[in-house]
Image: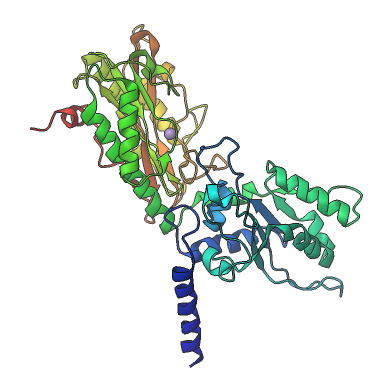
Amino acid sequence: MSRMKSQFRLFAALLATCILLPVFGSALEKQPFDAYHARRVALAQKLQGGVAILFAAEQPLVDFMPYRQDEDFYYLTGWNEPGAALMIVAAKPAGTAAADPARAYREILFLPTRNLRMEKYTGEKLDAANPHAEHVVGVDEVLPMTDLASELNKAIAADRRLASQLYIEPDAPAAKALITWVASTLGMDTTPATHDVSPLTTQLRLVKDPGELALLKKASDASIAAQLTMLHNTKPGVTERALAGKILATLMENGCERPSYAPIVGTGINSTTLHYSENTATLADGDIMVVDAAGEYSMYASDITRTVPVNGHFTARQREVYDVVLGAQRAAIAAFVAGKSTINDPQHRDPNSLDSAAWNYINTHGKGLHAEPLSDYWIHGLGHMVGINVHDPSGYPAVLKPGMVFTIEPGVYIPSEKLGVRIEDVFVVGQDGKLIDLVADLPHTADEVESAMKPAK
Ligand SMILES: [Mn+2]
Protein backbone atom coordinates (compact mmCIF):
# COMPACT_ATOMS: atom_id res chain seq x y z
CA MET A 1 0.00 0.00 0.00
CA SER A 2 2.73 2.42 0.97
CA ARG A 3 4.52 1.59 -2.27
CA MET A 4 1.34 2.48 -4.17
CA LYS A 5 1.15 5.71 -2.23
CA SER A 6 4.71 6.67 -3.06
CA GLN A 7 4.10 5.80 -6.69
CA PHE A 8 1.05 8.00 -6.62
CA ARG A 9 3.12 10.82 -5.12
CA LEU A 10 5.65 10.47 -7.88
CA PHE A 11 2.88 10.46 -10.47
CA ALA A 12 1.25 13.51 -8.93
CA ALA A 13 4.56 15.32 -8.89
CA LEU A 14 5.18 14.51 -12.53
CA LEU A 15 1.66 15.60 -13.42
CA ALA A 16 2.13 18.88 -11.58
CA THR A 17 5.43 19.38 -13.33
CA CYS A 18 3.94 18.74 -16.74
CA ILE A 19 0.69 20.62 -16.46
CA LEU A 20 1.26 23.53 -14.14
CA LEU A 21 4.72 24.64 -15.12
CA PRO A 22 6.03 26.07 -18.35
CA VAL A 23 9.17 24.47 -19.76
CA PHE A 24 12.05 26.22 -18.05
CA GLY A 25 15.40 26.62 -19.67
CA SER A 26 16.41 25.86 -23.22
CA ALA A 27 15.24 22.86 -25.16
CA LEU A 28 18.44 20.90 -24.65
CA GLU A 29 18.13 17.13 -24.53
CA LYS A 30 18.72 16.24 -20.88
CA GLN A 31 19.78 12.97 -19.31
CA PRO A 32 17.62 11.42 -16.58
CA PHE A 33 17.97 13.20 -13.20
CA ASP A 34 19.72 10.10 -11.78
CA ALA A 35 22.70 10.63 -14.11
CA TYR A 36 23.43 14.14 -12.80
CA HIS A 37 22.75 13.07 -9.20
CA ALA A 38 25.26 10.22 -9.56
CA ARG A 39 27.92 12.74 -10.69
CA ARG A 40 27.26 14.98 -7.67
CA VAL A 41 27.59 11.98 -5.34
CA ALA A 42 30.79 10.93 -7.12
CA LEU A 43 32.20 14.45 -6.71
CA ALA A 44 31.21 14.45 -3.00
CA GLN A 45 33.28 11.29 -2.55
CA LYS A 46 36.36 13.15 -3.81
CA LEU A 47 35.95 16.11 -1.44
CA GLN A 48 37.65 14.53 1.61
CA GLY A 49 34.61 15.44 3.70
CA GLY A 50 34.53 19.01 2.34
CA VAL A 51 32.17 21.31 0.48
CA ALA A 52 32.07 22.16 -3.24
CA ILE A 53 30.46 25.33 -4.58
CA LEU A 54 30.06 25.89 -8.31
CA PHE A 55 28.44 28.84 -10.06
CA ALA A 56 26.43 28.94 -13.26
CA ALA A 57 27.86 31.01 -16.11
CA GLU A 58 26.88 34.68 -16.05
CA GLN A 59 24.32 36.03 -18.48
CA PRO A 60 26.35 37.38 -21.45
CA LEU A 61 27.03 41.10 -21.05
CA VAL A 62 26.53 41.80 -24.72
CA ASP A 63 22.89 41.62 -25.73
CA PHE A 64 21.86 38.89 -28.15
CA MET A 65 24.89 36.70 -27.47
CA PRO A 66 23.71 33.14 -26.92
CA TYR A 67 24.05 31.75 -23.40
CA ARG A 68 26.33 28.80 -22.75
CA GLN A 69 26.36 27.22 -19.31
CA ASP A 70 29.54 26.71 -17.24
CA GLU A 71 30.70 23.24 -18.24
CA ASP A 72 31.29 21.70 -14.80
CA PHE A 73 28.03 23.24 -13.56
CA TYR A 74 26.14 21.73 -16.50
CA TYR A 75 27.85 18.36 -16.08
CA LEU A 76 26.72 18.21 -12.45
CA THR A 77 23.18 19.60 -12.83
CA GLY A 78 21.95 19.66 -16.45
CA TRP A 79 20.65 23.13 -15.45
CA ASN A 80 21.02 25.62 -18.26
CA GLU A 81 20.12 28.95 -16.62
CA PRO A 82 22.37 31.81 -15.44
CA GLY A 83 22.55 33.14 -11.89
CA ALA A 84 22.47 29.80 -10.06
CA ALA A 85 24.89 28.05 -7.71
CA LEU A 86 25.36 24.45 -6.62
CA MET A 87 26.56 23.44 -3.16
CA ILE A 88 27.56 19.85 -2.43
CA VAL A 89 28.35 18.92 1.15
CA ALA A 90 30.16 15.59 1.51
CA ALA A 91 28.95 13.13 4.12
CA LYS A 92 31.26 12.62 7.09
CA PRO A 93 31.30 9.98 9.83
CA ALA A 94 31.37 11.24 13.42
CA GLY A 95 34.85 11.93 14.86
CA THR A 96 36.02 10.94 18.31
CA ALA A 97 35.39 14.34 19.92
CA ALA A 98 31.85 15.41 20.78
CA ALA A 99 32.49 18.60 18.81
CA ASP A 100 33.04 16.53 15.68
CA PRO A 101 29.55 15.26 14.77
CA ALA A 102 28.51 13.17 11.78
CA ARG A 103 27.19 14.95 8.73
CA ALA A 104 24.87 13.69 5.99
CA TYR A 105 25.39 14.29 2.25
CA ARG A 106 23.58 17.37 0.98
CA GLU A 107 23.07 18.89 -2.43
CA ILE A 108 21.45 22.28 -2.89
CA LEU A 109 20.72 24.25 -6.04
CA PHE A 110 20.43 27.98 -5.35
CA LEU A 111 18.25 29.87 -7.81
CA PRO A 112 17.99 33.64 -8.31
CA THR A 113 14.73 35.31 -7.36
CA ARG A 114 12.42 35.95 -10.29
CA ASN A 115 12.66 39.40 -11.83
CA LEU A 116 9.28 39.98 -13.44
CA ARG A 117 10.46 43.00 -15.39
CA MET A 118 13.43 41.10 -16.88
CA GLU A 119 11.14 38.18 -17.71
CA LYS A 120 9.60 40.39 -20.40
CA TYR A 121 12.97 39.91 -22.12
CA THR A 122 14.03 36.46 -20.97
CA GLY A 123 10.74 34.58 -20.63
CA GLU A 124 9.45 33.01 -17.44
CA LYS A 125 12.04 31.68 -14.98
CA LEU A 126 11.93 29.19 -12.14
CA ASP A 127 12.81 30.27 -8.62
CA ALA A 128 12.94 28.59 -5.23
CA ALA A 129 9.52 29.96 -4.27
CA ASN A 130 7.94 27.52 -6.72
CA PRO A 131 6.70 24.54 -4.63
CA HIS A 132 7.67 22.13 -7.43
CA ALA A 133 11.19 23.49 -7.88
CA GLU A 134 12.94 20.28 -6.70
CA HIS A 135 10.95 18.20 -9.19
CA VAL A 136 11.78 20.55 -12.04
CA VAL A 137 15.53 20.66 -11.42
CA GLY A 138 16.06 17.15 -10.00
CA VAL A 139 18.25 18.32 -7.10
CA ASP A 140 17.42 17.31 -3.48
CA GLU A 141 17.04 20.88 -2.20
CA VAL A 142 16.34 24.16 -3.97
CA LEU A 143 16.87 27.42 -2.08
CA PRO A 144 16.99 31.08 -3.07
CA MET A 145 20.39 32.40 -4.14
CA THR A 146 20.24 34.86 -1.25
CA ASP A 147 20.60 31.88 1.14
CA LEU A 148 23.90 30.65 -0.30
CA ALA A 149 26.22 32.59 2.03
CA SER A 150 24.21 31.81 5.16
CA GLU A 151 23.97 28.09 4.28
CA LEU A 152 27.74 27.96 3.87
CA ASN A 153 28.20 29.86 7.13
CA LYS A 154 25.92 27.44 8.96
CA ALA A 155 27.82 24.44 7.61
CA ILE A 156 31.19 25.91 8.68
CA ALA A 157 29.83 27.02 12.06
CA ALA A 158 28.72 23.41 12.66
CA ASP A 159 32.15 22.07 11.69
CA ARG A 160 34.98 24.63 11.56
CA ARG A 161 37.21 22.17 9.69
CA LEU A 162 35.10 22.79 6.61
CA ALA A 163 36.76 26.23 6.33
CA SER A 164 39.88 24.49 5.03
CA GLN A 165 37.94 22.08 2.82
CA LEU A 166 36.23 24.45 0.41
CA TYR A 167 36.38 23.44 -3.26
CA ILE A 168 35.56 26.20 -5.75
CA GLU A 169 36.21 27.27 -9.33
CA PRO A 170 39.00 29.79 -8.67
CA ASP A 171 38.12 31.86 -11.74
CA ALA A 172 34.52 32.43 -10.65
CA PRO A 173 34.35 36.02 -9.31
CA ALA A 174 31.29 35.13 -7.22
CA ALA A 175 33.28 32.41 -5.44
CA LYS A 176 35.93 34.89 -4.25
CA ALA A 177 33.30 37.31 -2.99
CA LEU A 178 31.50 34.49 -1.19
CA ILE A 179 34.63 33.22 0.57
CA THR A 180 35.62 36.74 1.64
CA TRP A 181 32.13 37.34 3.03
CA VAL A 182 32.11 34.04 4.92
CA ALA A 183 35.55 34.76 6.43
CA SER A 184 34.51 38.19 7.71
CA THR A 185 31.15 37.09 9.08
CA LEU A 186 32.71 34.13 10.89
CA GLY A 187 35.40 36.39 12.36
CA MET A 188 38.31 34.69 10.62
CA ASP A 189 41.65 36.56 10.50
CA THR A 190 42.35 35.51 6.94
CA THR A 191 40.33 34.28 4.01
CA PRO A 192 40.31 30.48 4.06
CA ALA A 193 42.59 28.80 1.53
CA THR A 194 40.38 27.16 -1.06
CA HIS A 195 40.95 24.20 -3.35
CA ASP A 196 40.37 24.13 -7.09
CA VAL A 197 37.44 21.81 -7.79
CA SER A 198 38.30 21.40 -11.49
CA PRO A 199 40.93 18.60 -11.18
CA LEU A 200 38.19 16.56 -9.47
CA THR A 201 35.52 17.28 -12.09
CA THR A 202 38.10 16.60 -14.82
CA GLN A 203 38.60 13.08 -13.47
CA LEU A 204 34.84 12.50 -13.59
CA ARG A 205 34.34 14.07 -17.03
CA LEU A 206 37.08 11.96 -18.63
CA VAL A 207 34.91 8.82 -18.69
CA LYS A 208 31.56 9.32 -20.38
CA ASP A 209 28.40 7.51 -19.24
CA PRO A 210 26.09 5.88 -21.84
CA GLY A 211 23.80 8.93 -21.95
CA GLU A 212 26.75 11.19 -22.71
CA LEU A 213 27.96 8.79 -25.41
CA ALA A 214 24.50 8.94 -27.01
CA LEU A 215 24.66 12.76 -27.13
CA LEU A 216 28.21 12.69 -28.51
CA LYS A 217 27.01 10.32 -31.22
CA LYS A 218 24.18 12.69 -32.14
CA ALA A 219 26.68 15.56 -32.33
CA SER A 220 28.86 13.49 -34.66
CA ASP A 221 25.90 12.33 -36.78
CA ALA A 222 24.82 15.95 -37.34
CA SER A 223 28.42 16.88 -38.11
CA ILE A 224 28.71 14.04 -40.64
CA ALA A 225 25.63 15.46 -42.37
CA ALA A 226 27.27 18.91 -42.39
CA GLN A 227 30.51 17.56 -43.85
CA LEU A 228 28.49 15.75 -46.56
CA THR A 229 26.76 19.05 -47.39
CA MET A 230 30.23 20.54 -47.77
CA LEU A 231 31.34 17.69 -50.07
CA HIS A 232 28.25 18.11 -52.26
CA ASN A 233 28.60 21.90 -52.56
CA THR A 234 32.33 22.25 -53.13
CA LYS A 235 33.26 23.61 -56.56
CA PRO A 236 35.34 26.46 -58.02
CA GLY A 237 33.72 29.89 -57.60
CA VAL A 238 31.92 29.14 -54.33
CA THR A 239 33.15 31.25 -51.39
CA GLU A 240 34.55 29.76 -48.22
CA ARG A 241 31.98 31.76 -46.28
CA ALA A 242 29.02 30.44 -48.28
CA LEU A 243 30.27 26.92 -47.65
CA ALA A 244 30.60 27.67 -43.91
CA GLY A 245 26.99 28.91 -43.97
CA LYS A 246 25.74 25.69 -45.57
CA ILE A 247 27.63 23.70 -42.93
CA LEU A 248 26.02 25.71 -40.12
CA ALA A 249 22.57 25.30 -41.65
CA THR A 250 22.95 21.52 -41.82
CA LEU A 251 24.18 21.35 -38.21
CA MET A 252 21.12 23.22 -37.03
CA GLU A 253 18.74 21.25 -39.24
CA ASN A 254 20.11 18.19 -37.44
CA GLY A 255 19.42 19.50 -33.94
CA CYS A 256 22.69 21.21 -33.00
CA GLU A 257 22.31 24.43 -31.02
CA ARG A 258 25.60 25.83 -32.33
CA PRO A 259 28.87 24.80 -33.98
CA SER A 260 31.46 23.37 -31.55
CA TYR A 261 33.89 26.07 -32.77
CA ALA A 262 34.10 28.56 -35.63
CA PRO A 263 34.09 26.48 -38.84
CA ILE A 264 37.44 26.45 -40.63
CA VAL A 265 37.05 26.46 -44.41
CA GLY A 266 40.53 27.04 -45.83
CA THR A 267 41.43 26.77 -49.50
CA GLY A 268 44.88 26.99 -51.07
CA ILE A 269 47.37 28.73 -48.77
CA ASN A 270 44.61 29.01 -46.14
CA SER A 271 44.67 25.23 -45.85
CA THR A 272 48.05 25.58 -44.10
CA THR A 273 46.79 27.99 -41.41
CA LEU A 274 45.68 25.81 -38.50
CA HIS A 275 42.92 27.97 -37.08
CA TYR A 276 41.99 29.89 -40.21
CA SER A 277 38.37 30.93 -39.74
CA GLU A 278 38.12 34.19 -41.71
CA ASN A 279 36.64 32.15 -44.53
CA THR A 280 36.94 35.11 -46.93
CA ALA A 281 38.49 33.49 -50.02
CA THR A 282 36.84 32.05 -53.11
CA LEU A 283 37.39 28.40 -54.03
CA ALA A 284 39.76 28.12 -56.99
CA ASP A 285 40.18 25.28 -59.49
CA GLY A 286 43.14 23.08 -58.53
CA ASP A 287 43.25 24.16 -54.89
CA ILE A 288 42.99 21.85 -51.94
CA MET A 289 40.66 22.72 -49.05
CA VAL A 290 40.76 21.84 -45.34
CA VAL A 291 37.34 21.89 -43.66
CA ASP A 292 37.41 21.56 -39.87
CA ALA A 293 33.78 21.91 -38.84
CA ALA A 294 31.41 20.18 -36.45
CA GLY A 295 28.51 20.91 -34.15
CA GLU A 296 27.42 20.79 -30.56
CA TYR A 297 24.32 18.76 -29.69
CA SER A 298 22.76 19.51 -26.29
CA MET A 299 26.13 20.78 -25.03
CA TYR A 300 28.16 17.80 -26.33
CA ALA A 301 30.65 18.44 -29.13
CA SER A 302 31.95 16.76 -32.21
CA ASP A 303 35.15 17.68 -34.07
CA ILE A 304 35.72 16.59 -37.67
CA THR A 305 38.15 17.61 -40.39
CA ARG A 306 38.08 16.58 -44.03
CA THR A 307 40.44 17.64 -46.81
CA VAL A 308 39.05 17.81 -50.33
CA PRO A 309 40.10 18.96 -53.81
CA VAL A 310 38.04 21.98 -54.89
CA ASN A 311 37.46 20.64 -58.42
CA GLY A 312 36.66 17.10 -57.28
CA HIS A 313 40.01 15.56 -58.28
CA PHE A 314 43.22 15.49 -56.22
CA THR A 315 46.41 16.30 -58.13
CA ALA A 316 49.06 13.57 -57.91
CA ARG A 317 50.98 15.61 -55.32
CA GLN A 318 47.87 16.41 -53.26
CA ARG A 319 46.94 12.73 -53.27
CA GLU A 320 50.46 11.69 -52.27
CA VAL A 321 50.42 13.92 -49.17
CA TYR A 322 46.79 13.00 -48.44
CA ASP A 323 47.71 9.30 -48.42
CA VAL A 324 50.56 9.93 -45.97
CA VAL A 325 48.25 11.76 -43.54
CA LEU A 326 45.59 9.04 -43.83
CA GLY A 327 48.31 6.40 -43.32
CA ALA A 328 49.42 8.22 -40.15
CA GLN A 329 45.84 8.22 -38.81
CA ARG A 330 45.58 4.49 -39.56
CA ALA A 331 48.95 3.82 -37.91
CA ALA A 332 47.71 5.52 -34.74
CA ILE A 333 44.46 3.49 -34.82
CA ALA A 334 46.42 0.26 -35.32
CA ALA A 335 48.73 1.09 -32.38
CA PHE A 336 45.84 1.66 -29.97
CA VAL A 337 45.69 -0.47 -26.84
CA ALA A 338 43.03 0.38 -24.23
CA GLY A 339 44.49 0.91 -20.78
CA LYS A 340 47.96 1.57 -22.21
CA SER A 341 47.86 4.14 -25.03
CA THR A 342 48.01 7.90 -24.48
CA ILE A 343 47.32 10.50 -27.17
CA ASN A 344 50.11 13.06 -27.34
CA ASP A 345 53.84 13.18 -26.83
CA PRO A 346 55.49 16.43 -27.96
CA GLN A 347 58.81 14.56 -28.26
CA HIS A 348 57.21 11.79 -30.41
CA ARG A 349 59.25 9.18 -28.49
CA ASP A 350 56.90 7.58 -25.95
CA PRO A 351 56.05 4.18 -27.45
CA ASN A 352 52.69 4.27 -25.62
CA SER A 353 51.59 7.49 -27.31
CA LEU A 354 49.53 7.23 -30.48
CA ASP A 355 51.39 10.38 -31.48
CA SER A 356 54.61 8.36 -31.84
CA ALA A 357 52.93 5.86 -34.18
CA ALA A 358 51.55 8.63 -36.40
CA TRP A 359 54.81 10.59 -36.28
CA ASN A 360 56.89 7.57 -37.26
CA TYR A 361 54.61 6.99 -40.24
CA ILE A 362 54.77 10.58 -41.48
CA ASN A 363 58.51 10.64 -40.88
CA THR A 364 59.09 7.63 -43.11
CA HIS A 365 56.56 8.24 -45.91
CA GLY A 366 56.66 10.94 -48.58
CA LYS A 367 59.03 13.92 -48.74
CA GLY A 368 59.01 17.70 -48.96
CA LEU A 369 60.21 19.42 -52.14
CA HIS A 370 63.78 19.46 -50.76
CA ALA A 371 63.78 15.79 -49.72
CA GLU A 372 63.01 16.77 -46.11
CA PRO A 373 60.71 14.46 -44.12
CA LEU A 374 57.03 15.45 -44.09
CA SER A 375 57.15 15.35 -40.29
CA ASP A 376 58.80 18.81 -40.58
CA TYR A 377 55.32 20.00 -41.56
CA TRP A 378 53.33 18.38 -38.78
CA ILE A 379 53.08 21.17 -36.22
CA HIS A 380 50.37 20.23 -33.71
CA GLY A 381 49.38 17.46 -31.33
CA LEU A 382 47.71 14.29 -32.55
CA GLY A 383 44.43 14.81 -30.72
CA HIS A 384 42.48 15.69 -27.61
CA MET A 385 39.56 14.60 -25.48
CA VAL A 386 36.05 15.54 -26.64
CA GLY A 387 32.99 16.08 -24.46
CA ILE A 388 31.09 19.11 -23.18
CA ASN A 389 34.10 21.03 -24.42
CA VAL A 390 35.39 20.28 -27.90
CA HIS A 391 38.81 20.25 -26.20
CA ASP A 392 37.67 18.47 -23.06
CA PRO A 393 40.01 18.68 -20.06
CA SER A 394 42.07 15.56 -19.51
CA GLY A 395 44.95 16.06 -17.11
CA TYR A 396 47.42 14.79 -19.75
CA PRO A 397 48.88 12.34 -20.29
CA ALA A 398 45.64 10.46 -19.73
CA VAL A 399 45.75 6.72 -20.39
CA LEU A 400 42.86 5.93 -22.75
CA LYS A 401 40.21 3.70 -21.18
CA PRO A 402 36.67 2.51 -22.00
CA GLY A 403 34.20 5.41 -22.08
CA MET A 404 36.79 7.99 -23.15
CA VAL A 405 36.23 10.01 -26.34
CA PHE A 406 39.04 11.64 -28.29
CA THR A 407 40.23 12.74 -31.73
CA ILE A 408 43.01 11.42 -33.94
CA GLU A 409 43.92 14.24 -36.33
CA PRO A 410 47.33 14.14 -37.98
CA GLY A 411 48.10 16.92 -40.45
CA VAL A 412 50.79 18.09 -42.86
CA TYR A 413 50.99 21.78 -43.82
CA ILE A 414 53.39 22.91 -46.56
CA PRO A 415 52.89 26.67 -47.17
CA SER A 416 55.38 26.75 -50.09
CA GLU A 417 53.13 24.28 -51.93
CA LYS A 418 49.85 25.88 -50.69
CA LEU A 419 49.10 22.37 -49.52
CA GLY A 420 47.55 21.55 -46.16
CA VAL A 421 46.00 18.19 -45.28
CA ARG A 422 44.32 17.23 -42.01
CA ILE A 423 42.04 14.25 -41.38
CA GLU A 424 40.22 14.18 -38.06
CA ASP A 425 37.84 11.58 -36.67
CA VAL A 426 36.29 11.23 -33.19
CA PHE A 427 36.74 7.88 -31.44
CA VAL A 428 35.10 6.22 -28.45
CA VAL A 429 36.94 3.55 -26.48
CA GLY A 430 34.30 0.80 -26.29
CA GLN A 431 33.67 -1.34 -23.22
CA ASP A 432 35.56 -4.16 -24.99
CA GLY A 433 38.57 -1.86 -25.33
CA LYS A 434 38.15 -1.50 -29.11
CA LEU A 435 37.97 1.85 -30.87
CA ILE A 436 34.65 2.98 -32.33
CA ASP A 437 34.98 5.65 -35.04
CA LEU A 438 31.99 8.01 -34.63
CA VAL A 439 32.82 9.41 -38.08
CA ALA A 440 33.08 6.04 -39.85
CA ASP A 441 30.30 7.00 -42.29
CA LEU A 442 32.31 9.83 -43.86
CA PRO A 443 34.74 9.22 -46.74
CA HIS A 444 38.30 8.47 -45.63
CA THR A 445 40.42 7.52 -48.65
CA ALA A 446 41.17 9.95 -51.48
CA ASP A 447 39.03 7.80 -53.81
CA GLU A 448 36.12 7.89 -51.37
CA VAL A 449 36.39 11.68 -51.10
CA GLU A 450 36.38 12.09 -54.89
CA SER A 451 33.42 9.78 -55.40
CA ALA A 452 31.41 11.52 -52.64
CA MET A 453 31.97 14.82 -54.50
CA LYS A 454 30.52 13.55 -57.78
CA PRO A 455 27.15 15.13 -58.54
CA ALA A 456 24.23 12.75 -58.04
CA LYS A 457 23.09 11.16 -61.29
MN1 LIG B 1 40.26 18.73 -33.03
Q: Please state the horizontal and vertical placement of residue 176, each as a whole percent of the image.
A: 76, 45
**Which of the 4 image quadrants contains residue 275?**
top left
Q: Please state the horizontal and vertical placement of residue 377, each as a whole percent of the image.
A: 41, 17
Which of 61/154 is in front?
61
The answer to whether residue 411 is visible is yes
Residue at x 30%, y 37% (from the top left corner): 226
Which of 255/74 is in front?
255
Q: Is residue 383 left or right of residue 166?
A: left
Q: Please state the horizontal and vertical placement of residue 426, each as a whole percent of the image.
A: 37, 41
Number of numbered discs overlaid on the protein picture: 0
**Which of the 4 image quadrants contains residue 249?**
top left
The answer to whether residue 327 is visible is no
Residue at x 22%, y 21% (from the top left corner): 235
Q: Quadrant of ligand 1?
A: top left
Q: Is residue 302 above or below residue 152?
A: above
| Colouring scheme, one of rainbow, by chain, secondary structure, one colour | rainbow
Q: Is residue 385 left or right of residue 88?
A: left
The quadrant in which the C terminus is found is top left
Q: Is residue 308 above or below residue 29?
A: above
Q: Please state the horizontal and vertical placement of residue 66, each as a whole percent of the image.
A: 50, 40
Residue at x 39%, y 56% (from the top left corner): 431
Which of 237/334 is in front?
237
